[in-house]
Amino acid sequence: MVKVEGVQFQYGAEGPRMDFPDFACAQGERMLLLGQSGTGKTTLLHVLCGMLRAQAGTVEVAGRDLRASSDRDLDVWRGQELGIVFQRAHFVQSLSLEENLALPHQLTQGRVPAEVLERMASMLDRLGIAHRAQARPHELSVGEQQRASIARALLHQPKVVFADEPTSALDDENAAAVMDILDREAADATLVVVTHDQRLKDRYPHCVTLQRQDT
Amino acid sequence: MRLGLLYQAWQNLKAKPLQTALSLALLGFGVGMVSLMLLTEKQVNDAFERNIKDIDLVLGAKGSPLQLILANVYHIDAPTGNILQREAEKVLKHPYIASGIPLAYGDNHEGYRIVGTEHSYVDHYGVEVAEGRLWEAPFEVTLGARVAANLGMTLGDTFFSAHGLKDQTDIHTDKTFTVVGILEPSGSVVDQLLLTPMASIWNVHAHEGEVVDPATREITAMLLKKRNPLAVLTIPNTLRDTNMQVALPAIEVNRMTQQFGLGTSALRAIAMLIMALSFASIFISVLDNIRARRHELALMRTMGGTPSTLYRLLLLEGGLLSVAGTTLGLILSRVGMTVLGQVVENQFHYDLSSMGILSSEWALAGAAVLVGLLASAIPARRSLRLDISRTLSEA
């Protein structure tokens, strides 16, 4: 479901070249991409999401060869097949929470099917933020925003979910709670967690550690 | 759930009420000013055109030629004085003159002028009788349509005239006018006049039993139609040693509109400047949106939005602002026209209340929306080059 082989990336012509380790992650599997600052975690995440294009190697995610796909195809593909939980919860501030959650469907299909709304209500209920469905993003607490961000990434039932530092600012208890939610809600998807948080090593045995790139 | 681009654009505009209100106010005010000027110009020009109909020359007392025209053709100024009827008829007999309509006035009823004239005046403007008949005997009056409507007068009503063109202080209570007819609305100056035989005007100031000497009868003006174009050059020479003059309505009105034209040009320039500012405001608003909402835009790209989706969203926001601002402007100009029309109605009894959208206003609206779209299309192009990875990494 996620396959990386011989991937190299360089920012511009003068930037340092980054070489990433090979790894693969099967359908429904969970894995950790662990690395400290400067190891290229975010760069690799963006390569895996098709937001950056690797200069060499193979990047296959959800059955798609990202290096061979056009930008437009990748835009639509991201909305259909990927769920991304960002380190900082981003929302469209002018839309309500439920509208934000429905946005990927609107953007990829041009409409929001009724069954999505039912699924949304159920998911918001499980995450304990159903009562905030009509709230604007800035009216939500940080915890509510994080749960909403997870809901948005999973509502369209993506094949692959990428979570960027989902526990970085949380204490042990809250970190465990967030990861429990992610595990539960993304049960059918492949989950790749990109983090520097060593606490998650025990949770996911499949772990690829990224090394600092000095070239 | 309604979540189309139009809805999103509307929500985005609503989320910045001050910025949106400023852009709307600027565009609305600019379009409104231009539209109000177009409306006013059109209605005033139409009124001038309608009333000048086939009147080549106006014969009256010496004084300002423009005043002579405004007073006797449009009835919006005081007359320059009176002239002897027998002297005026000499001019009428000139071979270069085809016909003339005498006007005699100096009194009013409730601010509406009582004009002594002949039936040819009504014929000249092609006005039909709606009720009753045209005046025949002295002190019989046929009302213009607006006079009848505004004063609520009907056939058989009687009234006294007041001296002067507006005052209601010096009322001639010894002479009673009787309404014998009401005219159809015509859109001409006739609508706002009370028409009566000239004898009414002469007799209203005469003492009981006194007969006005035909040699001293005065009229205010005579509207002349020329037979020969040379009349324009010849007639003034024949009046050199009299207290009379002829004025050419077409020339005087043209001169007046040119003088007004300087003022309206300045106003139009100010309105255009305001419109330009509003387009700059839309430009800045969209540009600012792209900067302030770049994380949102990048986020939308991660959720299936293509660069063209973002571009259309931003374009829609500018388009909505332009359409709403232009609509607001057209509404404002109608409000302004209503207020202005009320003032003109009270002051001059002219009706400037036509509110239909002029073809020039459609052109103005189309241009405003197009320029507004362009003002948003240029900065919106930045969204096409948005670097999602870098933008999301900045957050």
Image: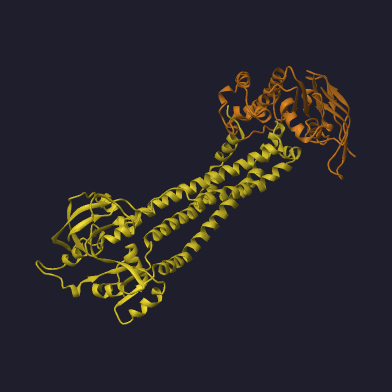
Q: Residue at x 51, y 59 (%)?
A: B268
Q: Position of residue B244 (x, y in %)?
A: 30, 76
The answer to whether residue B101 is left or right of residue A74 is left
Instruction: Give residue A93's quadrant in the image.
Output: top right
Q: Hey, which residue is sitting farthest front in the picture?
A: B95
- The quadrant in which the N terminus of chain B is found is top right
Of residue B260 and residue B285, the one placed in the foreground of this image is: B260
Q: Is residue B64 visible?
A: no
Pick the front one: B42 or A126: B42
Q: In the image, residue A152 lies at what x, y percent?
A: 66, 26
Residue at 71% from the left image edge and 38% from the top image edge: B307
Chain identifier of the orange chain = A
Q: Is residue A173 left or right of residue B22?
A: right
- Locate residue B221: give its quadrant: bottom left
Chain B color in figure = yellow
Is residue B316 among the parts visible in the rendering? yes
Residue B305 in the figure: left or right of residue B367 = right
